[in-house]
Amino acid sequence: MINGKKMVSLCISRLHEQENYRFISKLSDSLHKLGIALFIYDIASDIYWNESIIRAEASVFDLIRYDKSDVVIIMHEKIKSKTITEKLIKRAKEHDTPVIVVDGVYEGCMNVAFDYAAGFRNIVEHVICCHGITDLHMFAGYKGNPYSDQREEVFKEVLKEHSIPFSDDMVSYGEFWARPTIAAAEKIVASGKIPKAILCANDIMAINVSGVLSSNGYRIPKDVLVTGFDGIDEINYTVPRISSVRCSGIELAKTIACVVDRAIGEKVYPDFTYVEPKLIINESCGCDTLAESFDTNNIQRFNDHFYQYQDDARVLSDMTDRMNSSETIAQASQNLNNGVIHDMCCLINKSCLDYTFNHFESLVPSGVDSDMFMFYDTDSKNGEQYDFNIDSIVPDLDKLLNSGMPLIFNVIDFMNSPIGYVCFHFKEFDLTSFCTISQIVSSIGRGLGGFMNMRFQNYLTKRIEQVYRYDGLTGLYNRVSFSHEYEKKLAGITDENQPVTVILADLDGLKRINDIYGHPAGDIAIKTVASALKFACPPDTLCVRFGGDEMLAVVFNKCSSKYISSKMKRYLSNFNKKTNYEFKISASIGVYETSTAHDLDFETIIKKADAIMYVEKQAKKAKEAAL
């Protein structure tokens, strides 16, 4: 329960798919009527059973509040990762939170699944019993896939029940996708042994088998019957329309809502609940269509969505480019005001605001931080940005919970590193909004990641410039950059009689400090003299570490050299009193005053200042000897 309201957490993949959209719409509506809020944790692409892949976007499941969730629903077959499912179940059990696994079988969980075996059996028996076909061929997915293997076994069982001999060459493998299906179908056509009926383990394969047969002159269903499985919308665009079996997201949602209600209200946890797929009779199997007439307005809506997708893609691409070149995090945020993004807030790791290190060098993605930063909120009129604790989940949570619409979470990542998350809180169900989720999340990730990389590159450039221009110990100019700045300063002076003061400071007794107290002590002494020089001189003074223990300053305006010398000596005296080092730091100072009317050859003025400084140093030694 969250803020006094019961809550269900749903883990899913590819929310932008139309059947998923129907499922979410119905599930949200059903749960809302039961007074239950729905939090959806979505990844844009499934893992596809490749457990070796570590995807940053999967860290969205780390956002789940198990302590607040009354039930966790895992769409196992949508996510396609046993590792993730087991991890989610383990965490839920640690909080005694009931788990519903959809299309998976896990002990200690409520398992809800389509009865795929019964559905496929129905269509195979329809072809055999209603059409009297015994010359059958099957297009399975690929060996080792449990759904494909199950349908292949059902195919064999039904053949056996009807005394139809089976041989291995009666099965081809289309891997559930277009290209391998087309290749396998072309192979059948090339053999000349065309079966009377081809039953496919999904609709994508059925559509492509039909395409290959038709392009080679075979008529469907007159020459060959073709059937599919799943009942996707695309079967209504084919000629003839494909007979199939619909695994309805709406029916699945109704069933899950009932299971959730029982689990929360009655504390009854059924082990298995099955949803029966529905046989869809169309022309491709030789029947007159029994399916509901297809709304031709859907074609227009599809067209509209397609062109809007292209327009949105252009807008989001421009947004990404502008974010990459933004100067500040606030400026980067303003680029999200583009008309495509609405009903959303975006929070990023607070650490993302630190541009002094590379956030994307790790090969293993971590999670989002507990300390977040509100990067963008469509509900904020003034574009406020502020620190945000992840425990609060999103701003105005109570208001969003009362809206009756689900909260949809996606992780923002760049170069497989999570940098934050977004929460969509649409005001109504609209397919176009759902379809743009993955586009928006991906574009924000590229924009923010590029912005952070640019800031890091700028930081590195400045650091490199510092190394090139400044002495690493003292922070004063090094000799190369000082010479450059010195010549530039001279070139900009128009008054021939502008006064110039050269101050040379030499650390006293560096060798003694190094020999007795060590080189770290010597470095402290050098750095302190440099700080004293810079402190004593006017702000626009050129200061350089001229040698190991020699610092030089050039003042191009009228100044009091005595005041500078006195200020520098006071600085060193105060430093010695405050630090109580065993050694005392002092410096001999030489001052040479001239003007731009005289020869300002760099080597010449150095020699003159050095000569004056040498006199002071010798006087100090004589004084020390007399004591």
Image (cartoon, rainbow, N blue to C red):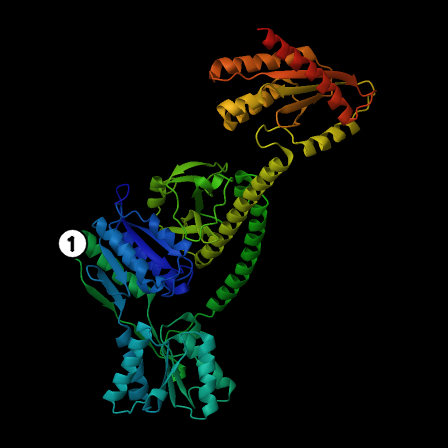
Q: As drawn, which residue projects farthest toward the bottom?
A: 192
Instruction: Give the image location of residue 462, x and y in percent.
Output: 60, 38
Q: Is residue 118 above or below residue 583?
A: below
Three-letter amino acid code at the position of disc 1: Glu
Instruction: Give the image location of residue 401, x and y in percent.
Output: 33, 45
Q: Secondary structure at mark 1?
A: helix
Q: Which residue is mark 1?
A: 266
Q: Quadrant of residue 119?
A: bottom left
Q: Is residue 25 above or below residue 281?
A: above
Q: Quadrant of residue 222?
A: bottom left
Residue situated in front as seen by the camera: 543 or 375: 543
CA neighbours of label 1 inside 10 A, class few (<14), some (14 to 19), many (20+) = few
Residue at 19% across, 59% down: 108
Residue at 31% across, 62% down: 82
Residue situated in front as seen by the camera: 502 or 189: 502
Q: Is residue 34 above or below residue 296?
A: above
Q: As drawn, which residue projects farthest toward the top?
A: 627
Instruction: Give the image location of residue 38, x and y in percent.
Output: 32, 51
